[in-house]
Amino acid sequence: MNQSLPEVVMPSCPVNKLLEGQKALVTGANSGIGRAVAIGLGHAGADVVVNYVANPEAADAVCQEIERCGSKALAIQADVSNETQVQAMFKLMMETFGTIDVLVNNAGIQRDAPFDELTLKQWQQVIAVNLTGQFLCAREAIREFKRRGVNKAVSCAAGKIICMSSVHEIVPWAGHVNYAASKGGVMLMMKSIAQEVAPYRIRVNSIGPGAIRTPINRPAWETPEAYEKLMELVPYKRIGEPEDIARATVWLASDEADYINGTTLFIDGGMTLYPGFTENG
Ligand code: BGC
């Protein structure tokens, strides 16, 4: 039941095109949450840049699924923590799609260790991808949003950024100090950017996933024993699927969510309700 990765490919193409005519870029879009989000945005009518670092075949498969439903897709390899590569990716996107309306800052990694064994390299890798990577991509997107302004034909906002954060932007996580620190950083980076660019009609928000069935946390769900233990942390008593995140991302990027700015939407089956207090405290 719980032991395999989900198939994201959907049998039919949705008719509700909430993001018709918009151009989106999703980082880390060839697996896990990023993959589902890229496909979701594509199915909602956006043309999508599918960013990846390794495994181009997986990125191509995401592009094919997006194109199957009538949107354009372009796979671009770039390490989000590398300024030159990020700028080259945005340049190629501008040349191909003309502009950007939606950035989903999704790429993220974990390099876990007990704190006294955490190496400087593990610390720096996680901060580089999860926090610096989101900064570099957000900066390029904001530059284009400010340059272009609102294009009423596609959206009432001049641009939307969605940062993929985590419940661990507020929930401390022993053994994952670098990861929790990076997500705590994403929270105030997101809010500070949102405060600064709101007058330009640019919306910046985060999504805070809980336990979602992806490769990053495979050990937490792949055996029945691990799954049962994980459920102690999830009042709703099911693991999240990447599509749970994709559906919310489409909505948050759309004009349906136009008055939402500078906030984190937790999608976690209640993980942030501190279930340990249900019969305690
Ligand atoms: C982490 C997962 C973890 C989840 C809930 C996510 O941000 O990447 O590994 O299962 O938070 O703890």
Image (tube, helix red, strand yellow):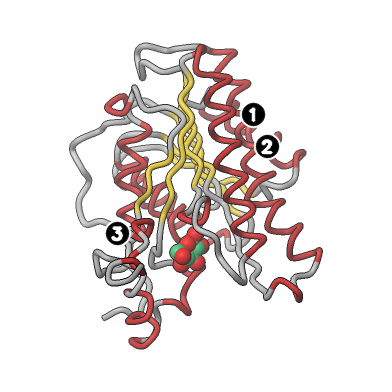
Please provide percent x and percent y for residue 278: 28, 67
Mark 2, residue position = 136
Secondary structure beneath label 1: helix
Residue 32 image-quadrant placement: bottom left
Asked whether mark 3 and ligand 1 are closer than 8 Å, the reply comes as no
Q: Which badge, 1 or 3, is on the more N-terminal residue? A: 1
Mark 3, residue position = 269
Residue type, numbered disc 2: Leu
Say if 273 sits above or below 276 in the image.
above
The answer for how far apart the CA atoms under marks 2 and 1 are is 7 Å
The answer for how far apart the CA atoms under marks 3 and 2 are is 31 Å
Say if 238 sits above or below 52 in the image.
below
| Residue occupying the point 21% across, 43% down | 14
Secondary structure beneath label 3: loop
Q: Which badge, 3 or 2, is on the more N-terminal residue? A: 2
Mark 1, residue position = 140
Please provide percent x and percent y for residue 240: 32, 62
Say whether residue 238 is left or right of residue 178. left
Say whether residue 251 is left or right of residue 216. left
